[in-house]
Amino acid sequence: MKSHKTWSTPVVPEESRSIPCALCGGEAFEVYLSCEGFSYLRCTACHLAQINPQPLKGAVEARYQQEYLAYELANERNFLALQDRSLKDAGFTDIETRFLPQGRSSLLDVGCATGALLESLRNRGWKVRGIEIGLPSADYARQVRNLEVYSLSLAENRFPAETFDVVLASHLIEHLNDPANFVREVYRILRSGGYFLITTPNIAGFQARLFKSRWRSAIFDHLYLFSVKTLSQLLVKNGFRIEKVITWGGLAAGTAPKPIKWIFDRAAKRLGFGDVMLIKSVKTL
């Protein structure tokens, strides 16, 4: 059985520095995954996995100024279908039913790419804004879809406190140098009772345990690899209450015959060992 890596920028030498654990602040690590050209270390205290030493923020952000628009547009329909399905499973329609009649409709999608999901949510009644630091994708969202999309990072946009009712971040947090500061900023800009829905690969899933360093999400662009436990701890530590967790993806396409993949995919969602997770959390008072 082979693992097919998710697409990533090439592994290149970059200026980097050693950092403490982003979750617990610990400074004791052990090698966890030895990949081609880089490694993940795991904090011996809380078990968060991260590339360490870590490339500097400027080097990381420079990766996403390359031309990804063609790739994103080619995969846009599949990505949107996955996002719609995961939001439905997480109970997003319940949020709509409760919030929209109350006039609570301000939504921010951080890492919105070409804006396909934002456009869909706008059509459902949400007042949407997005953040996308990849300029070609951001320009497409602005010019083709007429969306309000910003090209600075979340913190650099300096939104007023309690601006949004819902914040979405799909396949973003694993790319960030400082995920804890990101979560704190989301908490600051959410209104009381607002929802933060975050999607990221699950290092405690079946595929990660099976393939280890060959796991498809163990790639150069992913600075952190979270489990349900470590991501939940990060959210709770910064003021959120976990309302729902879902996982999906038992086996990647092409790694096993279709009947076996179907069985594993159903089991992954039911039993919680999927390759990708979505955590639905709410801002507490």
Image (tube, grey):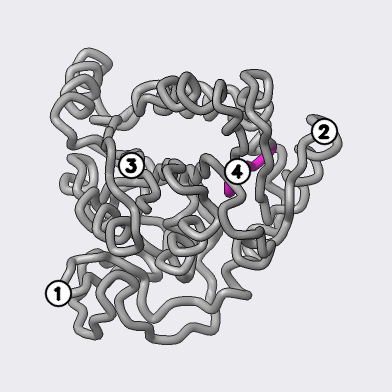
Q: Is residue 205 left or right of residue 73?
A: left
Circle 2 crowding by C-alpha within 10 Å: few under 14, some 14–19, many from 20: few
What's the amino acid at mark 2?
Asn
- Check if residue 8 falls in the magenta segment: no
**Residue 250 against residue 194 in the figure, above or below:** above
Outermost residue to the top: 259
The image position of residue 26, as x and y in percent, is 23, 81
Which one is in front in this view, the residue at disc 2 or the one at disc 4?
A: 4
SS category of the residue bearing label 2? loop
Q: Which residue is mark 2?
A: 146
Say whether disc 4 or disc 1 marks the residue closer to the N-terminus: 1
Q: Secondary structure at mark 4?
A: strand
Residue underneath mark 3: 279
Residue at 64%, 58% (x, y): give it: 64
Q: Nearer the viewer, mark 4 or mark 1?
A: 4
Residue 239 in picture, x, y percent from top left:
34, 59
Which label was assigned to residue 45?
Answer: 1
Quadrant of res 77: top right
Label 3 sits on what residue type?
Ile
From the viewer's side, name the closer residue of 77 and 11: 77
Q: Earlier in the sequence, mark 1 or mark 3?
A: 1
Q: Earlier in the sequence, mark 2 or mark 3?
A: 2
Bin the neighbour count of mark 3 within 10 Å (Cα to Cα): few under 14, some 14-19, many 20 and up.
many
At x 39% / y 49%, what residue is drawn? 283
Q: Which residue is mark 4?
A: 108
Magenta residues? 108-114
Q: Which image quarter: residue 17?
A: bottom left
Q: Mark 2 vs mark 4: which is more N-terminal?
A: 4
Q: Which residue lies at the image location 58% right of the left edge and 48% below the top edge?
A: 110
Decide: marks 1, 3 in contact (CB < 8 A)? Answer: no
Q: Is residue 111 magenta?
A: yes
- Between marks 3 and 4, how big is the CA–CA gap? 16 Å
